[in-house]
Amino acid sequence: MSIGLLSLIVIALAAAGYVIGRQLALSKAGGDIRRLHSLPGYYGQTVFLFTAVPALVLMLLWLLVQPLLIETRVTSMIPAADIPDGSSANLVMTDVRRIAEGIDLILAQGKLGEAEITAMRADLADVRSRLAEVGVAVGSNVRPGVFEAAKAYRDLSHSGHLAMAIAVLALALAGFGYALARIRPEFRARNVSEGFVRVLLIAASLVAILTTVGIVLSLVFETIHFFRLYPASKFFLSTTWNPKFGGGSDLGIWPLIWGTLYISVIALVVAVPVGIFAAIFLAEYASKRVRAMTKPLLEVLAGIPTIVYGLFALITVGPVLRDWFAQPLGLGTSSSSVMTAGLVMGIMLIPFVSSLSDDIINAVPQALRDGSYGLGATQSETVKQVILPAALPGIVGAILLAASRAIGETMIVVLGAGAAAKMSLNPFEAMTTVTVKIVSQLTGDTEFASPETLVSFALGLTLFVFTLGLNILALVIVRKYREQYE
């Protein structure tokens, strides 16, 4: 039974429970709503919640835990002789999952029967060709141990899904019967229903927190693994970035940090003044007609894909900077440079700064403006001495959002700044950032067993700590200079 069908059955049963619970409450009250503690709808909601919520939570937990248990068990079944040199059990498990999916496709298309699949042996049949017929590509010939592990993986997955369907439906029926058994006129259905909703709201609010904790823990554990294989002193103190898969790498982080900061600073120098001035104009000086036309046009920039910005940097901005500035000044001959990526990224960040700043400025009470004008201040003096100080927390937040966006950008840097990891003050030289190297290291080797791959997690954790420091700095600035008004 598919997950969608199982969910639909549970929800349909819960919906039926809502109707039955509501009618049962009315019948036990003799049709007189005044005899009920709660409105009839609350009794139906109680049955709905007791039927759907526990069953769906069980299904979610089952879907999270079952793959881990099955992979642990199947991995132990793979003979060491069937793991190729230079590979790992994790990579072999990727083939196991792919082969299991291919077997399901073979059965679905009727090319073989279940008995034939069970009797099939990898040493006697061309399993790779069979899988290719249904569109499943395997990199090498399927070894007997891997094929048997794939069949075991498939059998365990199907058994697990069947057991899950039985358990989920049983729990839904149990909740359905339990909720109906509790219905009586004096039952506090409203309290139970609101309690359920309160728990659901708390769970929803914890999603962001738990996600953040999960991200941090995953980075920390893999970073610890990396520092067991590569000295932390060389990572934090070396100024050379020269990864070599297979050993002999020099993985100093400072060239990447320098490139990230250099490009981000140029982008913010472009985006912050333009964005704030645009926000001030739209909020304080533009007429309604001009504002209605200009703000949507400005916000169109935020909807352009970053790959398009990267192409714009590569094809247009880079050659212009090279031909008009870098070559005449003798500063470089490459169209990929820090200045190219910084300028284009700054253009991309303008709507992030302007739109948020505009909303914050418009949120400043009109009474502050009227008071300033009443004291004889001009419009520019009111903007500088009243509106901007009052809107400072929001403006700082907009700048911080733009800075975080600049630090995490990848595609514009790849196409506009190149991939050279070096430290230089020349803005017309090619450099790279932390995010670009994270991508390049993960695409180079995916078994997460070498320092050259695990360094991506150390880079990610460093970037996380850096952006966290930016947030703390922003909070300090806001608390120091914020003006509060009653």
Image (spheres, rainbow, N blue to C red):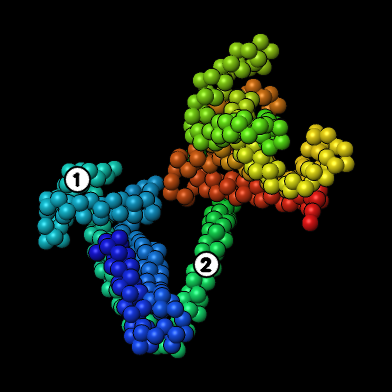
Q: On the image, which quarter does residue 332 sit in?
A: top right
Residue 24 at x, y = what percent?
Answer: 33, 83
Q: Is residue 253 visible?
A: no
Depth check, mark 2 against mark 1: the one in front is 2
Residue 15 at x, y = what percent?
Answer: 33, 70
Q: Residue at x 30, y 73 (%)?
A: 16
**Horizontal placement of 412 versus 176: left or right?**
right
Circle 1 Cα neighbour tier, 10 Å, few/some/many (<14 / 14–19 / ≥20): some
Q: Secondary structure at mark 2?
A: helix
Look at label 1 and name its amino acid: Val
Q: Is residue 201 visible?
A: yes
Q: How many marks can you see?
A: 2
Look at label 2 and name its amino acid: Leu
Q: Which residue is mark 1?
A: 134
Residue 246 at x, y = what percent?
Answer: 48, 41
**Horizontal placement of 192 versus 287: left or right?**
left
Q: Secondary structure at mark 1?
A: loop
Q: Residue at x 43, y 49 (%)?
A: 447
Q: Quadrant where the N terminus lies?
A: bottom left
Q: Residue at x 23, y 59 (%)?
A: 151
Q: Which residue is mark 2?
A: 201
